[in-house]
């Protein structure tokens, strides 16, 4: 009986780990844009961003966007579970890319504008280097998140120093 209980416990842990891994999938390459190795690298990087900043990032590629650019986020993440984040989608069927943000992402990334995003990605997109484009995009996202995190830490420190002066 004890062995059966232990086996069931191990099975439950494995099932819940598999379910959690599925929930935290950051790359949905429906258009087969990236190699398996590129997906692994992007997944690892985006998991790291989530682990450090608590900020969700998602990349979607599709050849069937159904004309919907802004609604992809809701298909991939529950707002209550992941309130802060951004999603980037390559919509190859309509020849465009799109970025959508939620929560803290709206504050941090909305001011940058489409021109800045296009300037960042255009050199890669002209060469059809989608992996390079996403790495540049994640570099910029990390830089923004790091800057915001540093500011928050500075504000906390300033508040504490003000209390003691």
Image (spheres, grey):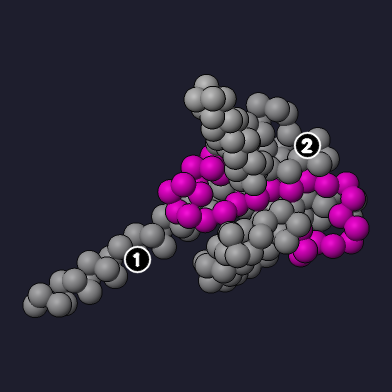
Going 15% across and 77% down the picture, which residue do you hit?
Answer: 163
> Helix, strand or loop at disc 1?
helix
Above or below, 77 relative to 51: below
Circle 1 packing at 10 Å, graded few (<14), some (14-19), many (20+), is few
Going 41% across and 55% down the picture, which residue do you hit?
Answer: 146
Residue beneath disc 2: 33
Circle 2 packing at 10 Å, graded few (<14), some (14-19), many (20+), is some
- What x and y, as percent, mark residue 151? 35, 65
Residue beneath disc 1: 152
State the image quarter where residue 80 is shown. Answer: bottom right
Going 22% across and 67% down the picture, which residue do you hit?
Answer: 157
Above or below, 38 relative to 23: above
- What x and y, as percent, mark residue 150? 34, 59
Going 52% across and 56% down the picture, which residue do you hit?
Answer: 55
Cα gap from disc 2 to disc 1, whole angstroms: 37 Å
Quarter that holds the N terminus: top right
Q: Nearer the viewer, residue 141 or 22?
A: 22
> Helix, strand or loop at disc 2?
loop
Q: Nearer the viewer, residue 23 or 144?
A: 23
């Amino acid at each position: 009986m004890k062995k059966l209980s232990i086996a069931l416990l191990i099975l439950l842990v494995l099932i819940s780990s598999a379910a959690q891994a599925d929930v935290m999938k950051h790359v949905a390459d429906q258009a087969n844009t990236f190699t398996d190795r590129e997906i692994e690298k992007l997944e690892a990087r985006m998991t790291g961003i989530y682990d450090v900043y608590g900020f969700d990032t998602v990349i979607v590629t599709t050849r069937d966007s159904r004309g919907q650019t802004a609604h992809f986020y809701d298909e991939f993440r529950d707002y209550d579970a992941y309130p802060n984040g951004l999603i980037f989608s390559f919509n190859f069927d309509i020849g465009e890319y799109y970025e959508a943000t939620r929560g803290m992402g709206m504050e941090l990334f909305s001011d940058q504008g489409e021109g800045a995003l296009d300037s960042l990605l255009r050199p890669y997109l002209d060469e059809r280097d989608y992996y390079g484009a996403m790495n540049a995009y994640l570099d910029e996202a990390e830089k923004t998140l790091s800057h915001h995190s540093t500011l928050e830490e500075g504000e906390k420190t300033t508040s504490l120093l003000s209390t003691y002066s």
